[in-house]
Image (tube, grey):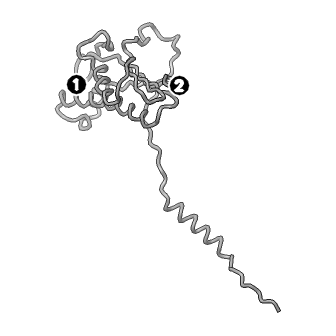
Amino acid sequence: MAKKTPEVPSSSLADIAFMLLIFFLVTTTMDVDSGLERRLPQWVDPEELDDDQQIKERNVFVVLVNRNNDLLVEGEYSRIEELRERTKEFMKNPYNDEALPEKEPKEVQYFGEVMITKGVISLRNDMDTKYGTYIAVQNELVAAINELREELSKSHFGKSYKDLTKEQQESIREIYPSRISEAEPKKVGGN
C-alpha cells in the first residue's frame, strides 16, 4: 500500500491573498500630481480683434526654453537666476522706457488713477525641455509678479499682501495682473 502525501489545505488561500491585497492597498501611499494654477483666457478669433486690441511687440516679454534647457529672454541668452528681476523690470517699466510695455491710466480702488501696464509674458518651451527647467522658469515668472504685488502692498498699505482684505488684494492684482501666456510646446531651437 502506497503512502499518500498530505495535501496543503487550499481553502483559505484565497482569503489570505485577498487580505494581503487589502493590506497593500491600504498601506501604499499614492503620489499626488501637483500642477500649476492657471486660468485660461477665453478664445477670441484674431480677425475679430480691433487694432487697439492687437498686442504690440513691445508689450510682449518673450521667454523661450530650448531642448538643451537654455533660456532665451527677449532674444538674449540668460540664466534662470536673472529671470525674476528682468520680469519685474518689464512689468513695472518704472521709467516709461520705449522698449518696455505701454501703460494706460485706470481708476483703481484704494489707489485712484494709476498707470497700468499692458505687458504680457509669453512662455514657449521645446518639446524636449526637462520638466524641472520648465517648472523653474514658471516659478520665477510667477514669483516676479508676486514680489511686485508684495512690494506695492507694503509701500501702500504697510502690510504684507497676504494680510490685506480681498478688495485690497484685488486692487493690487489690477495694477500687477498675472498675464502669462503659454504657447504649445514645439521645437524652439537647440540641437
Which amino acid, mark 2? Lys
The residue lying toward the viewer, choosing from 132 and 24, is: 132
Return the mark for residue 186.
2
Q: Residue 44 placed where, x, y %?
A: 50, 18
In space, the residues marked 1 and 2 are separated at their CA atoms by 43 Å
Please, is residue 107 above or below residue 80 in the view?
A: above
The residue lying toward the viewer, choosing from 189 and 83, is: 189
Q: Residue 170 placed where, x, y %?
A: 30, 29
Which residue is most to the front? 191
Quarter the N terminus occupies: bottom right
Residue 164's image quarter? top left
Q: Identify the residue at horizontal 52%, vertical 24% (top origin).
A: 187
Residue 55's image quarter? top left
Q: Residue 184 placed where, x, y %?
A: 51, 26
Return the mark for residue 110.
1
Q: Is mark 2 on a helix, strand or loop?
A: loop
Please, is residue 31 above or below residue 116 in the view?
A: below
